[in-house]
Image: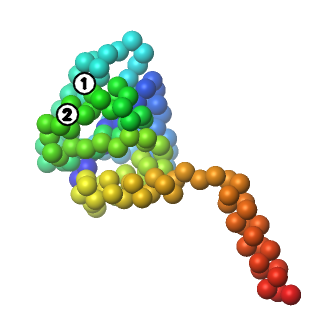
Amino acid sequence: MISVIISGHGDFPIALKESSGMIFGEENNLIAVPFFKGEGIQTLQEKYHQALKDIPEEHEVLFLVDIFGGTPYNAAASFIAEDQRMDMAAGVNLPILLEVLSLREHLALKDLLNNLKAMSQQSFQVCSEHLEKVKTANQDTREDEL
């Protein structure tokens, strides 16, 4: 099982957890750790330390943070450097969190991260590109009917 700590600037991790709850319901071992203006990296590391106390020892731990190289990322990196059962992905959004929640009981952490890399490219979509594909497909269908 993989426990998840979502972290980021402001209320973002709290809102992300609440949004996932609207879709999947209440999840165990999903912890939101916000980083607020005026807090330093040491405060955030203390918050992570407290969150980790609530996670069973046998669980792997995935930190999902908002920005690569930001304070939430850097604070988590210090824990990951010392514990091989932990890792992190930056650039979290709701589709990525939902993917994690749906697979975390079935995959090991490294396998889950590999899935996320592939999935993250698919979760970012441009509407006009899809509309063009639909338009082209509809035109092809009409031409085939003639």
Residue where numbered disc 2 is placed: 79
Please tell me which residue is depicted at 21% across the width and 31% down the height of the picture.
78
Please tell me which residue is depicted at 67% across the width and 60% down the height of the picture.
130
Please tell me which residue is depicted at 47% across the width and 43% down the height of the picture.
93
Amino acid type, label 2: Phe
Q: Nearer the viewer, residue 87 or 59?
A: 87
Q: Is residue 139 above or below residue 31?
A: below
Q: Quadrant of the C terminus?
A: bottom right
Q: Name the N-terminal-most of marks 1 and 2.
A: 1
Residue where numbered disc 1 is placed: 45
Residue 27 x %, y %: 35, 45
Q: Do residues under tags 1 and 2 come within 8 Å of each other at their CB atoms?
A: yes
Secondary structure beneath label 2: helix
Residue 65 x %, y %: 37, 36
Please tell me which residue is depicted at 17% across the width and 37% down the height of the picture.
81
Q: CA distance from mark 1 to mark 2?
A: 8 Å
